[in-house]
C-alpha cells in the first residue's frame, strides 16, 4: 500500500488550510482509493475526525521520523509555507521536516506552494540548500516560479499548477441558506459577504471597510455579513470593523467546515475579501469577488482570473471599492461568464498536483 505523509499548516482551525487538505485528500483518493495518507498536524485528533486520515503531532519529531521511515513520499504543502514575512520560525520548521525526510532517504515534493517572499539572508541560504534537494516542485502561480529562480532553486523539476482548493467541486447551497436563516439573514436584498483578517493592528483598512459596508447598505439596500475563515481571530477583526459602522451588519461567530463555507459563499451576491481562500471559494462557487491585497499571493491569484486588487491594506479607499462594486453591478453578472474559462483551466491544474505526485512515485519504483 502506498503511504504519503503530508506536512503543512493543519490542525489550527484555519478554514483555508483545512480546505487545502480536504482537496488534496479528495484528489488522491480519486486517483488511488487504497492510498494511505498521514498528516502532520497541530491537533491530530481534530485532523483524524475532520478528514478521516491518520495523523501525528507536527512537533513530535520522533513520531514523525517513524511515520516518514515507513512512507513512500513526503508532501510539503500546499499554501504559503515557505516565506518569512508572517513568521521566521515557520519557514525553518517546514524546511526541517523536508530535511528529515531526505535524511531518511525519502522523496519529497513541494506541493502547490506559494513561494516567498523570502527576505532574510539565512532564510534564502536555507531555502537554496534544502530546495535544491527535493525531487519535484509544483507552484500555484508564475510569481512563485520566479521566486524559486530568484532563490537559485534550479535542480528539481518545477511545474506551475494551481491552488489545490480549486479542484473542489461546488457544493449545494442549502446548507448555507440554513446558516444564513439561523442568523437572521433571510430576504431578497443583495447579500454581500466580507472575509477579513487582522493584520499588524492596522486601522486604515478597517475604517475603509466599515465605511464601504455602510454605503452598500444605505445606498444599495444590501445586507452585509462578516464570515470568519479562522475563529476567533477573524471574528475579533470583524467586530472592530462593525463597531465603526453606522448601519447594522451581522458577524457570524461559529467555526465552519469547508462544505459550509463553500455553501455560504454560494449564497452571496458579492464577496469582498482580504483572505486568499475566500477568493478561491468564490471562484469555485462562481460568486463575484473583490480582493484586497496584503500579500503577493492575493495579486497572483487575481491575475489568473484577469483581475486585479481593489487596493492594498495600506492604500485601499472607499471610492475604489465602490467603483469595483458598481462595475460588477453588485450581482457581478458582467464578469461571471468571463471567469468560466480560466476557472475551468485552474481546476484541471489543481488536480494535476496529485497526478504529478503519483507519477513521481511510479517513476522512482521503476528505478
Image (spheres, rainbow, N blue to C red):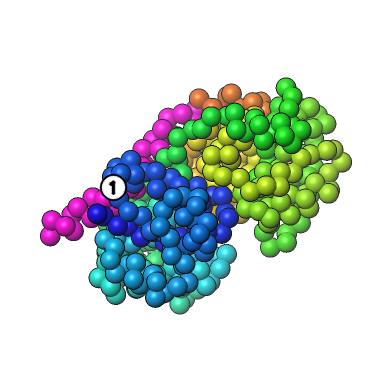
For the residue carrying disc 1, how many other residues have a C-alpha within 10 Å: few (<14), some (14-19), or many (20+)? few
Q: Is residue 89 magenta?
A: no
Chain part drawn in magenta: 338-367
Q: Position of residue 48 (x, y in %)?
A: 46, 55
Residue at position x 43%, y 60% in the image: 55
Residue at position x 49%, y 33% in the image: 170
Left or right relative to 6: residue 195: right
Total tally of numbered discs in the picture: 1
Q: Position of residue 26 (x, y in %)?
A: 39, 43
Q: Nearer the viewer, residue 29 or 284?
A: 29
Which residue in the rendered view is the most extreme toward the left?
A: 367
Q: Position of residue 58 (x, y in %)?
A: 46, 67
Left or right relative to 80: residue 350: left
Q: Nearer the viewer, residue 157 or 243?
A: 243
Q: Nearer the viewer, residue 200 or 186?
A: 186
Residue at position x 36%, y 55% in the image: 37
Q: Position of residue 76 (x, y in %)?
A: 39, 60
Residue 109 seen in the current view: no
Residue at position x 74%, y 36% in the image: 183
Please tell me whether mark 1 sits on a helix, a strand or a loop.
loop
Vertical order, 30 against 12 (above or below): above
Q: Which residue is mark 1?
A: 34
Q: Quadrant of the N terminus?
A: bottom left
**Does the magenta stretch mainly form a helix, a strand or a loop?**
helix
Vertical order, 33 against 85 (above or below): above
Residue 226 seen in the current view: yes
Q: Is residue 340 magenta?
A: yes
Amino acid at each position: 500500500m502506498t503511504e504519503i505523509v503530508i506536512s503543512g499548516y493543519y490542525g489550527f482551525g484555519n478554514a483555508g488550510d483545512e480546505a487545502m487538505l480536504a482537496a488534496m485528500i479528495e484528489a488522491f483518493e480519486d486517483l488511488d482509493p487504497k492510498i494511505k495518507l498521514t498528516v502532520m498536524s497541530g491537533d491530530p485528533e481534530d485532523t483524524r475526525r475532520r478528514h478521516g486520515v491518520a495523523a501525528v503531532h507536527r512537533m513530535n519529531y520522533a513520531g514523525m521520523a517513524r511515520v516518514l521511515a515507513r512512507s513512500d513520499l513526503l508532501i510539503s504543502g500546499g499554501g504559503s509555507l515557505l516565506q518569512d514575512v508572517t513568521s521566521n520560525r515557520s519557514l525553518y520548521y517546514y524546511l526541517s521536516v523536508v530535511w528529515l525526510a531526505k535524511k531518511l532517504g525519502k522523496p519529497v515534493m513541494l506541493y502547490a506552494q506559494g513561494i516567498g517572499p523570502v527576505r532574510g539572508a539565512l532564510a534564502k541560504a536555507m531555502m537554496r540548500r534544502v530546495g535544491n534537494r527535493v525531487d519535484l516542485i509544483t507552484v500555484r502561480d508564475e510569481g512563485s516560479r520566479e521566486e524559486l529562480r530568484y532563490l537559485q532553486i534550479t535542480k528539481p523539476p518545477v511545474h506551475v499548477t494551481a491552488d489545490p482548493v480549486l479542484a473542489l467541486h461546488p457544493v449545494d447551497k442549502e446548507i448555507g441558506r440554513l446558516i444564513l436563516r439561523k442568523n437572521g439573514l433571510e430576504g431578497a436584498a443583495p447579500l454581500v459577504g466580507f472575509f477579513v483578517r487582522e493584520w499588524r493592528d492596522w486601522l486604515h483598512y478597517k475604517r475603509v471597510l466599515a465605511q464601504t459596508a455602510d454605503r452598500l447598505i444605505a445606498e444599495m439596500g444590501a445586507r452585509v455579513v462578516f464570515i470568519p475563515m479562522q475563529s476567533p481571530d477573524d471574528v475579533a477583526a470583524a467586530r472592530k470593523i462593525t463597531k465603526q459602522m453606522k448601519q447594522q451588519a451581522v458577524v457570524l461567530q461559529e467555526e465552519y467546515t469547508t462544505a459550509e463555507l463553500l455553501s455560504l459563499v454560494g449564497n452571496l451576491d458579492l464577496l469582498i475579501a482580504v483572505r486568499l481562500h475566500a477568493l478561491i471559494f468564490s471562484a469555485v462557487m462562481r460568486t463575484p469577488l473583490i480582493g484586497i491585497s496584503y500579500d503577493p499571493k492575493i495579486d497572483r491569484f487575481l491575475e489568473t482570473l484577469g483581475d486585479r486588487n481593489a487596493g492594498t491594506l495600506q492604500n485601499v479607499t472607499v471610492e475604489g471599492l465602490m467603483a469595483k462594486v458598481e462595475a460588477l453591478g453588485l450581482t457581478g453578472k458582467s464578469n461571471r461568464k468571463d471567469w468560466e474559462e480560466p476557472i475551468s483551466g485552474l481546476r484541471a491544474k489543481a488536480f494535476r498536483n496529485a497526478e504529478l505526485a503519483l507519477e513521481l512515485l511510479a517513476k522512482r519504483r521503476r528505478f
